Structures are given as C-alpha cells and as structure tokens.
Image (tube, helix red, strand yellow):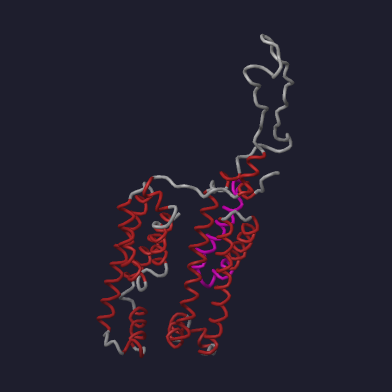
Amino acid sequence: MAAGVVMFSSVLVLLTAFERLSGLGSLDTRNGVEDILAEPAIDRLGLDFDGAMQILYVSGVIAALCATATAILGWFVLKPDTSARRAISILAVPLFVTGLTAGGFAASFVAAGAAMLWMQPAREWFATGMWTPPPPPASAAAEATRRTPWTAPPPPSGGAPGARPGTQAFQQPQPTRQPPASHPAHAPAGHQLHDRPRAMVAAFVLTVLTAGGVLVASVLSLAVVGLSPDLIMAELERQQPEIVAEGLTTDQLRLSTYVSASVAIVWCSVALAFAGFAMARRAWARRGLMITAAFSAGACLLVALSAPFLIIPAVAAMATVACLGRTEVRRWFAPVPR
C-alpha cells in the first residue's frame, strides 16, 4: 500500500509540475505572481518578479525530476529493495519542499508513503523478507480450539488393567465430534483477520488519497481566505468576473469559504475514520464508508458541470463503492459462525 501511494502520488506531482511549467508564461500566472509579491509579508523579502519566476521554474523542474525518480523507485520497493527505500526517503524531502509550489498537496502523500516504508510491518519485511502477523484475539483462538475435531486417545499397548495375558480388552468405539452440518467449514479466525482482500485495500487507498487531498485543500483554503482574502477575490474576478459583477463582497466570499471548507473537513474526516475502522474489519465502518462514498460521488457529479476537476473524486468515490461491494469483501466482513 505504501508503494502504491508513492507511485500514484508521484505521477500526480509529475503531471501538476508539467502543467505549472507550461503555464509560467501565461498572463494569469504573471498576474498571480505580481499579486503575491504585493503582499506585505512577501514584500519585506525584497524578491522581484524575475526572481520569483526563476524560483517557480527551478522548483517545478526539481519536483518533476524527483517525482519521476520516486515513481520508478516505488516499483522496485515491491521486490523488496532496501536501496530503493533509502532513495525514496532522500528524494521525498526536496519533493515535499518544491511540491508546495509546483506539485500541490500530492507531494505530501509521497512523503507520507516514504515514512510508512520505515514502520512495521514494512521494516521487518525489508529486513527479513517476511512479516510476523499479530496474534489473534483470545476469543478467536478459543473459537478455533473449540471447533477442532477430537478423538479419544488410543488404549495402552498392554491392554486394559486386569486383562489376562494374551487377550485384548474390548474397547467401546468412541464417537468423533464433527462440526455441525449446517455450518460451512471456515478457516480459523486468526488467518481471516490478516487476509484482507485487495479490493478492500484499494478502497482504503482511494479514500485516503481523495478524502485526504480534499481535507488538505480545505484547510489551505481556510488559511488563505483568513490571511489574504483580497488575493482570492482578485483571482475570482479574473476567472469568473460574472460572479463579482453580481455584487459578491469580500465578507460574503469569506463566509461561504468558511462554511464550505468546514463541511468538507468534517465530511472527509468521517470518511477517513470509516476507512480506518473498515481496515480493522468493522462491518459498520464498511457500510458507513459505502454511504459516504456514494453521497460524495453524487455531490461531485452535480457540481462537476461548473467545476470539471471534480470528476476525478467522483470517479474515485464510485470505484470505492464498487470495491466495497465485491463478493470477497462481503465475505471478509461476514461474522464467523458459532
């Protein structure tokens, strides 16, 4: 899962960096840089327009190169290759720094994936080529012991006590306890806990990438609106002048951003919590994640007419619902019969 996060996020950073580099000469980018340089906090740094454009260009090139390398190294991590893990960890630092201006929030997911490669059970897997699953719960071990068939122990080789020499004592055949016919045979619960279906892992990764990305973007929007509302207003006037012409004020923009971002933060946090509990094999979390993803897909498709980029989270949410509805996932969440 960590390798998948690194590779997928690296591709996103690479695409975003190419888009930023190709649009450096556009009028919108130049106007945006001039507005940022006019901010009081940035103006004290003494940075001119040419220097800012050079920083954007260099950071974009570094982000693209690092993202290309981490995307390739993420495949070699699956071998496992310890040198690839070290290289990803080193490249994640400049990628995270340059990704703040060139790669968007996806660069932070590359750093998170690199950190996961140094945690258990990945650390043990890189060291020994295997991993030790945690012991099953006491209730699962007791259930597996109770369902194990048993037979009576064999009689002693000398026969029963008191038997005459050369004679064999008669032994009553002992019944063999078998599981009830109405209950199908199941693997021990301890093994089922570790054999997560790939569809469940895919649903978890999709939720972390999409909900986590929207969560980070919402927090950043709150910070930007709180610190520089005039900058957001100027950008909105360039992109959608008809909204500003209708009388939208800075206070209205701040209030609408606060409300929408707060709702998005709460919604994404709930989805991430459902995803975490679903990975821990909680059936109620699976149902909650399916409902959350379904509503997210519908809302994104409704708003996608005015914001086409929302098609990406809509497709991810629909894929999450499809993964959680697969037969192997439903069987994995089914309770063990008693």
Q: Whole-percent x and y of residue 99?
A: 36, 69
Query: How many numbered discs, if any?
Result: 0
Q: Is residue 15 left or right of residue 301?
A: left
Q: Whole-percent x and y of residue 152?
A: 68, 27
User: Is the N terminus in the top left, top right, bottom left or bottom right quadrant?
Assistant: bottom left
Identify the residue shown where x is 57% and y is 64%: 273
Q: Is residue 45 left or right of residue 242?
A: left
Magenta region includes residue 326: yes
Q: Residue furthest top?
A: 166
What residue span does the magenta drawing correspond to? 300-329
Front one among 90 and 288: 90
Q: Residue furthest front?
A: 162
Identify the residue shown where x is 44% and y is 52%: 121
Identify the residue shown where x is 73% and y is 35%: 180
Q: Main secondary structure of the magenta part?
A: helix
Q: Whole-percent x and y of residue 83?
A: 30, 52
Q: Whole-percent x and y of residue 42?
A: 33, 86
Can you say whether 104 is above or below 168 in the image?
A: below
Can you say whether 221 is above or below 154 in the image?
A: below
Front one among 284 and 23: 284
| Displayed quadrant of residue 9 | bottom left
User: Is the C terminus in the top left, top right, bottom left or bottom right quadrant?
Assistant: top right
Can you say whether 219 is above or below 163 in the image?
A: below
